Image (spheres, rainbow, N blue to C red):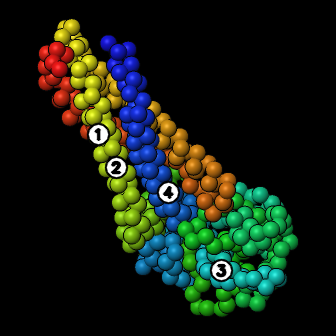
Amino acid sequence: MYGVALRMLLGDRAKYVGLIFGIAFSTMLMSNQISIFVGLMSRTASQILDVREADIWVMDPRVEYVDEIEAMTDTQLQRVRGVDGVDWAVPYYKGLTVAHTRGGSLQQVIVIGVDDATLTGVASKMLLGSVENLKQPDAMIMDRAGFEFMWPDEALSLGKVIEINDRRAMIVGICDASAPFATFPVVYTKYSTAMTYIGSTRKQLSFVLVHARAGEDPHALAARISAQTGLKALTWRDFALATVGYYVKRTGIPVNFGITVALGFIVGAAVVGQTFYIFVLENLRQFGALKAMGVSNATILRMVLLQAVVVASIGYAIGIGLCAGFFEVSSRVSINLRGFELPWQVAVGTAGAVLVIIVIASIASVRKVMVVDPAIVFRG
C-alpha cells in the first residue's frame, strides 16, 4: 500500500513539485531570516565574546550594554583588585575615534586599549604578527576586515601607518576579530597608548576585566565585587546576554525579522495546504477504490501521512541546504557577512515549523479521505 501511495504522489508531477517547492521556500525563508537575526544579535556582543580570558566584566552601575560606556576613575581598578576571590584584574578601554591614512582617507574605528603588561583582551586568532608586538612604541593590531576596508586593493601586510588625533600608530599585527555590530575597523593597542589618543580626562577606564581564583564561583564573586565596590559586575555570559537583550528590547530588529519569519510560515502553510488538499481531492477515486477492495481507514490514513512526510522531508532538505549554501557563499563573497551561519538549533526549530505546516496541510485532506464513499468508484 505504501508503494501505491508513493506512485500516486509521483504520478501528479506538477502538484508534487509544487508541494516540495512550497516547503523548500518556507524552510529557506524561515531558517535564513532566523539565522541572520541570531548572527546580528551575536555581533552586538562581539567585543565581549572575543575576550576569552576574563570571567567577569566590571563597569559603572548605569551601564546597560557594552556600547554604552560611562568611564570610571583608575582608582576603581585597585578597589576591584582588593576584593577577596579576585585572581587578577586589568583595565580595558573601548571607544570610537577617527583614523587617517597616509593616502588621505579617514575612517571611524573602534579602539580597544588592553593592559600594558598582560595584553589581556586582544582577539586570540592572529593572522599576521604577534600579540607581543603591541609592546613596541605606537603599536596597533587591526582586525582583518578593517585592514581590507581601509586598504581594499592591497594584501594583508604589516607596517602600515595611520594617525589618530594627530598621533602616529603602526600596524604590527592583523587579527581575525569577531564582526562588530557596526562594521568599523577594530584596532587594539596598549591601555597607556590608548589614553594618549583620547587625551587626558579625569575618567578614562571603560571596564575592568576580572579573572576569578581557582575554585571561585564567578557569579558569587561578581555579587561580592558589586557589594564591596558599588560597581556593576557581571559574568561575561550575563553581560553578553544583557547586551543582546538591550538591542532586542530597544530596536525594531526583532519585529522586522519576526514579521518575515511569520510570513514564511503563513505562505508555506497556505500554499502547501491548498496544494495538498487539491491533490487529495483529485485522487479520491483511487482512495475510494482502495476502500472498495477492503483497505481500512487506518491504512488509508498512513498512506496520506506517508505522502505528506515524503513531501515535507524532501522540501525541508532542499530548503535547509539552500540556506546553508547561502551562508557559505556569502561569507566568501563579502567579509562584511562573515559570522553569519546556520546554527543547528535553527535547523531543528525550522524542522519543527515544517512539521506544523505539514500537519495543518494534512488535517483537512485526511478528513476528506476518511469520509469518502467507496461507491464513488462506480459513479460517473
The mark nearer the N terminus, 1 or 4, is 4
Horizontal side of residue 39 vs 149, given as left or right: left
The image shows residue 7, relative to residue 185, as above or below, that is above
Q: Position of residue 106 (x, y in %)?
A: 72, 83
> At x 71% / y 56%, what residue is drawn?
125
Left or right position of 322 against 111: left
Residue 232 visible, this orientation: no
Q: Is residue 200 visible?
A: yes
**Residue that numbered label 4 is attached to:** 36
Q: Secondary structure at mark 4?
A: helix
Question: Does dot 1 land on a helix, a strand or a loop?
Answer: helix
Task: Please tell me which residue is depicted at 74% across the width and 73% down the height of the picture.
Answer: 150
| Residue type beneath disc 3 | Gln
- The picture places residue 1, in percent across and down from the top left corner, at 32, 12
Q: Nearer the viewer, residue 377 or 43?
A: 377
Q: For label 1, count other residues whose C-alpha is less than 10 Å away and answer few (under 14), some (14-19) or many (20+).
A: many
Question: Which circle, 4 or 2, is nearer the viewer?
Answer: 2
* Number of the front mark, 3 or 1: 1
Q: CA distance from mark 2 to mark 1?
A: 10 Å
Label 3 element class: strand
Q: CA distance from mark 3 to mark 4?
A: 25 Å
Upstream in the sequence, badge 4 or badge 2? Answer: 4
Q: Badge 2 local density, few (<14 within 10 Å), some, or many (20+)?
A: some
Q: The C terminus lies in which quarter of the figure? A: top left
Q: Choose top left, top right, bottom left or bottom right for residue 192.
A: bottom right
Query: Residue 108 bears which disc, if any?
Result: 3
**Residue 267 — which label?**
2
